[in-house]
């Protein structure tokens, strides 16, 4: 059965990843649906007809398979605050030795992406995140070598 993501419907409410409250404020991972087809009878002969007939139409239906991963706005803001504090606190040391901090930089930037924080960052925070991404990329590509 094919699993699909539906963009034509609103994300169904699910439990906040952190506090468990019902929400769909921030969708971290979209809900997945099983797609299946069903035959429905759209028209049929009445019981007294000489020959029984029916007209069948195949329609596509969806069953929720995996709930969306969601976070309520309160938790989202709280965790964004923590991210900004982390950025503030570690940016300089991360940039000083991106080689050594690669794992932390990568987990930071991927969290920024996962929680979709980027658009709510201040311009200076956005620049820092972009710089971190750039540095991490250079380390991965071997453009920043081992420290001597
Ligand atoms: Zn919450």
Image: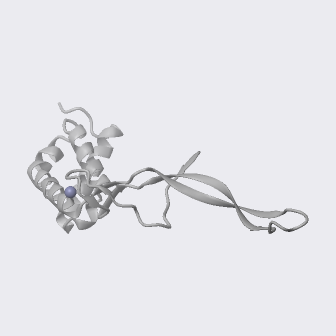
Quadrant holding ligand 1?
bottom left
| Viewer-proximal residue among 97 and 9 | 9
| Viewer-proximal residue among 86 and 141 | 86
- Name the residue rendered at 22%, 61% in the picture: 127
Q: Quadrant of residue 27?
A: bottom left
Of all residues, the one furthest to the front in this rendering is 48
| Viewer-proximal residue among 52 and 12 | 52
Q: Is residue 21 left or right of residue 40?
A: left
Q: List x then y, in percent, for residue 40.
A: 69, 61
Q: Is residue 70 left or right of residue 18?
A: right
Q: List x then y, in percent, for residue 77.
A: 17, 61
Q: Is residue 26 left or right of residue 60?
A: left
Q: Quadrant of residue 28?
A: bottom left
- Looking at the image, is 101 positioned above or below residue 81? above
The quadrant the N terminus occupies is top right
**Picture colour scheme:** one colour
Q: Quadrant of residue 81?
A: bottom left
Q: List x then y, in percent, for residue 70.
A: 31, 56
Q: Is residue 25 left or right of residue 85?
A: right
- Name the residue rendered at 17%, 30% in the picture: 148
- Name the residue rendered at 84%, 63% in the picture: 53
- Name the residue rendered at 21%, 41% in the picture: 104
Of all residues, the one furthest to the left in this rendering is 89
| Viewer-proximal residue among 118 and 101 | 118
């Amino acid at each position: 059965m094919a699993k699909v993501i539906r963009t034509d419907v609103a994300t169904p409410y699910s439990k906040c990843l952190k506090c468990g409250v019902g929400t769909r404020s921030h969708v971290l991972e979209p809900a997945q649906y099983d797609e299946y087809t069903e035959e429905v009878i759209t028209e049929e002969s009445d019981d007294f007809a000489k020959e029984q007939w029916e007209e069948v139409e195949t329609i596509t239906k969806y069953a929720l398979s995996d709930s969306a991963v969601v976070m309520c706005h309160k938790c989202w803001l709280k965790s964004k605050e923590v991210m900004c504090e982390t950025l503030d606190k570690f940016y300089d040391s991360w940039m000083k030795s991106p080689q050594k901090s690669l794992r932390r930089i990568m987990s930071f930037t991927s969290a920024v992406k996962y929680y979709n924080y980027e658009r709510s960052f201040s311009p200076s925070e956005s620049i820092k995140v972009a710089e971190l991404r750039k540095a991490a990329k250079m380390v991965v590509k071997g453009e920043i070598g081992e420290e001597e």
